[in-house]
Amino acid sequence: MDAAEQDAWRALATERVAGAGLRLGAARVEVIEFLAREGQCLLGASDIVARLREQGGRAGQASVYRILEELTALGLVRRLVDESGIARFEIAAPGSHHHHFIDDATGEVAPFSDPELERAVEAAAARAGFELSSHEIVLRGRRTGTRSAARSSR
Amino acid sequence: MDAAEQDAWRALATERVAGAGLRLGAARVEVIEFLAREGQCLLGASDIVARLREQGGRAGQASVYRILEELTALGLVRRLVDESGIARFEIAAPGSHHHHFIDDATGEVAPFSDPELERAVEAAAARAGFELSSHEIVLRGRRTGTRSAARSSR
DNA sequence: TTAGATGCAAAGCTTTTGCAGGATA
DNA sequence: TATCCTGCAAAAGCTTTGCATCTAA
């Protein structure tokens, strides 16, 4: 995600938050700014609280949890639960749809996207009689090195 | 899962547990018997403890958690974490590979399987340079009624 | 001015750990 | 008989809630 995309998400978030009748209080601004900067990868709420503190922020954890919940409801953030049951959040920018690959050896999480796989999911849903609102795919295994995945995170 | 499949899983579980050098203590037998009977669908640990108690069992929650962890490690049980971060377990019988569809309206979880989707996942992994050890797919949406899915659970 | 936002602290839940007593092979 | 297994109770995390105070609009 480059600077322009960060700005686009920040603008979208600000607009949608205001549009929902929510005020731009200190904590809300801190969280939105932080996510625009560093929210591409899956982050736990406690990570976010800690990073904000490091950066001089004053948002309390209750506010961060409440705000992440709101942003998720507004479709600005995607919330996933990892294997250990911890909620992890990442920006849901338009056109940023992707899934995750977890390396068995390192535990590292890497995002990937594959249009053909998306089509296959839609086709499978249609066959089963489902109309999809969302879907998640998690792959686990190891890299073969045949081709390196794009970005990695966490 | 019919009676024969239940028996097959119970036999496999008993054998593999013994093979791992674990003893068939009271709690372990209770959990294995219960899962053979009612473990096709995703169940939370607390559900299992409660049902066991209802059925006259004496297994404590610590034992149930420990046993579910062991069975998962032995590949006899599949562990998934739901949206709210709660671990849910189901029998991992040979040939029972499937994924889950969650109905937006009711929250109901229904298992489904689709060989073509499986092939698409393998193909996507190969394209990305991953060698898969496992994968999970969760679909969310609503039933169109065009075709009803097989069994439903939870 | 006033409904909404925030932070602290406490409560809630699921899951894990410590241990003394009990059972399996 | 020597391990391994169990259950109880307490501890540990993550997340949510209560509440008094502050603030954006």
Image: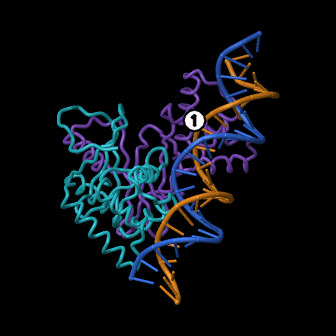
Chain colours: A purple, B cyan, C blue, D orange
Q: Residue B9 in the image: x percent, y percent? A: 26, 65
Quadrant hosting residue B98? bottom left
Q: Residue B6 in the image: x percent, y percent? A: 24, 60
Q: Is residue A106 above or below residue A13?
A: below
Side (left or right) of A55 relative to B50 = right
- Foreground pick, A39 / B149: B149
Q: The C terminus of chain B lies in which quarter of the figure?
A: top left
Q: Is residue A39 above or below residue D12?
A: above
Side (left or right) of B124 relative to D13 = left
Q: Residue D12 in the image: x percent, y percent? A: 65, 59
Q: Crowdedness of circle 1 by 10 Å Cα count: few (<14), some, many (20+)?
A: many
- Foreground pick, A16 / B154: B154
The answer to whether residue A88 is seen in the rendering is: no
The answer to whether residue B25 is seen in the rendering is: yes
Q: Residue B4 in the image: x percent, y percent? A: 18, 61
Give the secondary structure at mark 1.
helix
Chain ID at mark 1: A
Side (left or right) of B7 relative to C8 = left
Q: The N terminus of chain B lies in which quarter of the figure?
A: bottom left
Quadrant hosting residue D22? top right
Which residue is the site of mark 1?
A: A10
Quadrant hosting residue A32? top right
> Mark 1: which amino acid?
Arg
Query: Residue at image x 38%, y 78%?
Result: B20
Query: Residue at image x 59%, y 24%?
Result: A18
Q: How many marks?
A: 1
Q: Is residue B74 above or below residue B38?
A: below
